[in-house]
Image (tube, helix red, strand yellow):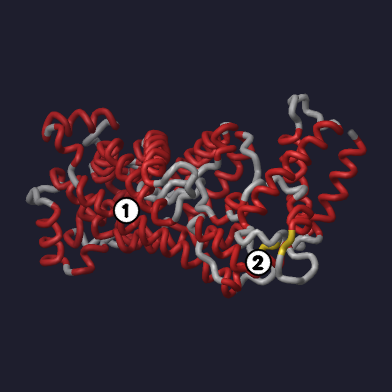
Amino acid sequence: MKKVSKILGINLERTLENSHRFTATKRMLNQERRNLKMKIFTTGDINKDGKLDFEEFMKYLKDHEKKMKLAFKSLDKNNDGKIDASEIVQSLQILGLTISEKQAELILQSIDADGTMTVDWNEWRDYFLFNPVTDIEEIIRFWKHSTGIDIGDSIAIPDEFTEDEKKSGQWWRQLSAGGIAGAVSRTSTAPLDRLKVMMQVHGSKSNMNIVGGFRQMVKEGGIRSLWRGNGINVIKIAPETAVKFWAYEQYKKLLTEEGQKVGTFERFISGSMAGATAQTFIYPMEVIKTRLAVGKTGQYSGIFDCAKKILKREGLGAFYKGYIPNLLGIIPYAGIDLAVYELLKSHWLENFAKDTVNPGVVVLLGCGALSSTCGQLASYPLALVRTRMQAQAMVEGAPQLNMVGLFRRILAKEGLTGLYRGITPNFMKVLPAVGISYVVYENMKQTLGVAQK
């Protein structure tokens, strides 16, 4: 056992120190070393006795080498025993990731040991022998949107999970960690979210700005009123995530043939349809959230009281007011979010990647936050109309208009800027929401025992 650990440690150290995939800082090097050791021990420990003996270690190496051979052959398109930049470009395009020849050369440089700008089997094996990555899909996995990033939006495209994650049960731990992170993030930014809803609903009548809006809410209902409607906003995370994840998997199966990789277009369509399915299921909760946020102190005693009063006074149809503009908003949001994210990734690889293709946490969070913000900017007018339709019955003297009628009324009375009322507090919550969500997500992953990549 000691000999195996010693061999493993020495080889890991050489692999890590000679690899451009990892940063040069000692702290990060040590962390990566610990993560790799843990994953190798977990994968190789067949009898699950908490120990890795010599036989298990040798079996792990043989099995892992077979998987690496398959991955190498899948990249070696012309079967000449070497991988070049054009083959990397072609392989990643199949997976839905478009990169340039220059970006492909960066990947080659991180593996190429002899400076030929091609990678043969020996170089590939030496590089990945002590890294539990088994296929090219996992090698570019770091470019995924993070499951744990939650900015309170319900229409983001869900993440994909590998077959290993599904079989090992890692997917539900990641979703649970993301759900808890979302709950903390939404609660932390709830005052800004309520202010946004108030500004959307009351429009130019109240001349509400950010400072005045907070003062008005506190004066009317005290500090606690700033979190009005947050309870149901947190409660709906679990059913919404579950339905979206299930629907996303089903739509991917419908749009792709068995064994075919999911491309960017299929991911966009599947994600949009999954978002629409989840919204259909939880939309009444969205309406209740808006009514609670706009409601005055004492108007509703809680979630069930609000639902009961809506049903009694307005009927079942009231729970789906604003449903159409909400669905229509999914397409521009998801499309622009995904397109901007891919554009930012390509720009970073083209201009800022030097000796590594791994962008790191800060870059990924920045790409995610900016792409989501662009998606919100495009879909915001539809979100505003949806919110007004949800709350029309609560505003005294307000006519009960449909989507087209509301658009016309807003443009006539408030102008184009009226369609973006409340967008400032909405944008103000993005950065704190992303930061809080990420920190909580990473801590919850450790608590729930999510395997580190």
Residue 198 or 406: which is nearer the viewer? 406
Residue 177 as seen in the image, left or right of residue 26: left
Please name the amino acid that badge 2 sits on.
Asp
Give the spatial CA distance, label 1 vs label 2.
Answer: 54 Å
- In this orientation, does residue 424 appear? yes
Q: In which quarter of the image is residue 323?
A: top left
Q: Which residue is drawn at 29% across and 59% down?
A: 380
Which residue is at a point 74% across and 28% down the rendered structure image?
Answer: 46
- Mark 1 lies on residue: 195
The residue beneath circle 2 is 84
Side (left or right) of 410 relative to 108: left
Q: Residues within 10 Å of mark 1 (few under 14, many from 20)?
A: many
Please give the label number shown on residue 450. none
Does residue 235 show up?
no
Q: What residue type is labelled 1?
A: Leu
Q: Where residue 450 sits: x, y (%)?
A: 61, 38
Describe the element under mark 1 as helix, strand or loop: helix
| Residue 333 x/y as whole percent | 34, 57
Query: Is 8 on the left-hand or right-hand side of 150?
Result: right
Q: What element carries label 2?
A: loop
| Residue at 28%, 51% in the rendered image | 197
325 up-or-down from 49: above or below: below
Which quarter shows the N terminus?
Answer: top right
Name the residue nearer the viewer: 197 or 317.
317
Mark 2 neighbour density, 10 Å: few (under 14) some (14–19) many (20 or more) = many
- From the top left corner, tell me how far across and down residue 363 is, in percent: 57, 63
Label 1 vs label 2, nearer the camera: 2
**Residue at image location 74% in from the left, 26% down from the top:** 48
Query: Disc 1 or 2, which lies upstream in sequence?
Result: 2
